[in-house]
Amino acid sequence: MSTLEQQNSAGAGAVRPGMAFDEAALARWMQANVEGFRGPMTVLQFKGGQSIPTYQIDSPSGCYVLRRKPSGALQGAHSVEREARVQQALAGVGFQVPKIHGLCTDESVIGSWFYVMERVNGRIFWDATFPDVDRNERPLYFDAMNSTLAALHRLDPKAVGLGDYGKPGNYFARQISRWSRQYLEDSAAGRDPNMDALINWLPAHIPAGDDSSIVHGDYRCDNMIFHPTEPRVIAVLDWELSTLGHPLADFSNHAMMYQMPPNIVAGLAGADLKALNIPSQEQYLASYCERTGRNNVVSWEFYIAFNFFRMAAIFHGIKGRVIRGTASSSHARERAESFPLLAELARRSMEDCK
């Protein structure tokens, strides 16, 4: 199945009310800035994009993806210019990212900053059990995800022009402070006892070690495109939360799929891994450690608790936007309803760490 078919099956359709823009102005910008572009064009909107509205642009010259800043008050995580920058830098060293055609910081074009990138042809898997893959090949797909993330973490940020892409060091303390503050300041979304407990517990239990690398921030199977027929990652998508950070935070966020209920995001909770021929969490972690030169990981449950807390804080923010009527995704309400369970899962991992 092509990427277009995959994305359409995920809900690319008519632009939602309040999310339209001047398509003629965009066409003029693309004519001037996207090599080879030819109109006329058709604009669709993806059902995803909880915080960065994402569109599909179809034209005789090809298909493109546009990501724009949302309306309303913005936080750093909505910076499309950062997404464009990191992908351009990584493309320069051959890492698997889509080609960026252009970044527009002129709000007069469509009303907000945006960038346009290529649409990579391949497969997107929305189910972490990879149900459409032959049982004997599933370990190869997991190995491809594992090796791609390990390769990202082995890159030298300075060598690829990203030495100033974030603050090096003290990553967990800064992240815990950031998401705690966002949670506490969003009074409209309310409070949760599990989150309150985590805010007190996490800062006091940060493991020793202060590694720093380029981190993706939301590395999941549905945020990457696989080769049409081979167990190989050919593009990693959605760099909204990327920065310089601790590689174990990034890897554990990815490995959180082993505890993640599949109705929230692509997860493996409740799946029969042996029957599916999917590597265990222990095997998956061991493979990553071997690729990155680690002997083991101490306090693994902390990393899982931290990432469930972080995701819960993000979903809490979505809940607040739903209440205020500024959520950009048609599925934002579902995300908001999942917030209490994520907070509970974070609390469970915290208790497992004791």
Image (cartoon, rainbow, N blue to C red):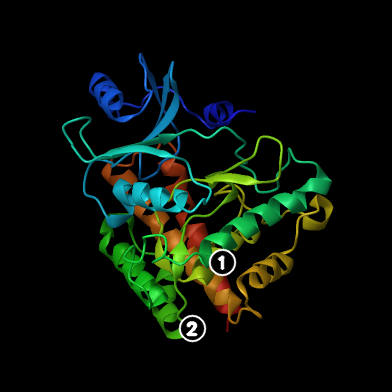
Residue 227, placed above or below residue 83: above
- Which residue type does callout 1 highlight? Ser
Residue 287 has which mark? none
Q: Which residue is mark 2?
A: 209
Q: Picture coordinates of residue 78 (x, y %)?
A: 31, 50
Q: Residues within 10 Å of mark 1 (few under 14, many from 20)?
A: many
Helix, strand or loop status at disc 1: helix
Q: Residue at x 44, y 32 (%)?
A: 46
Q: Picture coordinates of residue 281 (x, y %)?
A: 69, 65
Q: Quadrant of the N terminus?
A: top right
The picture quadrant where one finds residue 68 is top left
Q: Residue at x 40, y 74 (%)?
A: 171
* Whether residue 34 is visible: yes
Residue nearer the viewer, 157 or 333: 157
Q: Earlier in the sequence, mark 1 or mark 2?
A: 2
Question: Would you say 18 lies left or right of 214 here?
Answer: left
